[in-house]
Amino acid sequence: MDVRDVPERGRFELVESVEGGATSVVGFADYEVRGNVAVMPHTVISSDRRGHGLGDVLVGAAVQELRGRGLTIDPVCWFVADYLERHPSQH
């Protein structure tokens, strides 16, 4: 599994490799940069992949990347807010 930023779509995607070297999107976390704030309104993991910690992998990587850019996170999405509450060092 890898997390990639897709800025033209305003989201981070959690992808896995499939046969033939292609990738399949397992989930995504939307974001919008407003000044020095990254608003994160929505996170989705494919229904057949939920319950395995993939949301934490996705949101953790997204938050780390956005914070690395000097941005403050505005966790509009309940899952992002919950993640930051469980990982206060990343808020």
Image (spheres, helix red, strand yellow):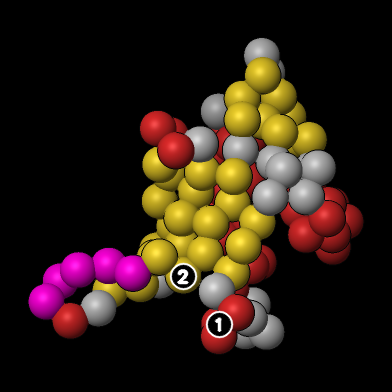
Q: Quadrant of the C terminus?
A: top right
56 or 41, nearer to the observer:
41
Residue denoted by label 1? 49
**Residue 49, relative to residue 41: is it above or below?**
below
Residue 33 image point, x, y percent: 61, 25
Residue denoted by label 2? 26
Please say whether residue 87 is visible from this viewpoint: no
- Residue at image location 59% in from the left, 45% down from the top: 30
SS at badge 1: helix
What kind of residue is marked 1?
Arg
Residue 67 image point, x, y percent: 63, 35
41 horizontally vs 33: left or right: right
- Residue at image location 28% in from the left, 74% down from the top: 17
25 horizontally vs 27: left or right: left
Mark 2 Cα shell of 10 Å, populated few (<14), some (14-19), many (≥20): many
Mark 1 Cα shell of 10 Å, populated few (<14), some (14-19), many (≥20): few
Which residue, as the protein is rendered here, is positioned at the far front? 47
Q: Which span of residues is magenta-colored?
A: 20-24
Say whether marks 1 and 2 touch (CB < 8 Å).
yes
State the count of labels.
Answer: 2
Queried whether the magenta region covers residue 21, the answer comes back as: yes
88 or 34, nearer to the observer:
34
Q: Earlier in the sequence, mark 1 or mark 2?
A: 2
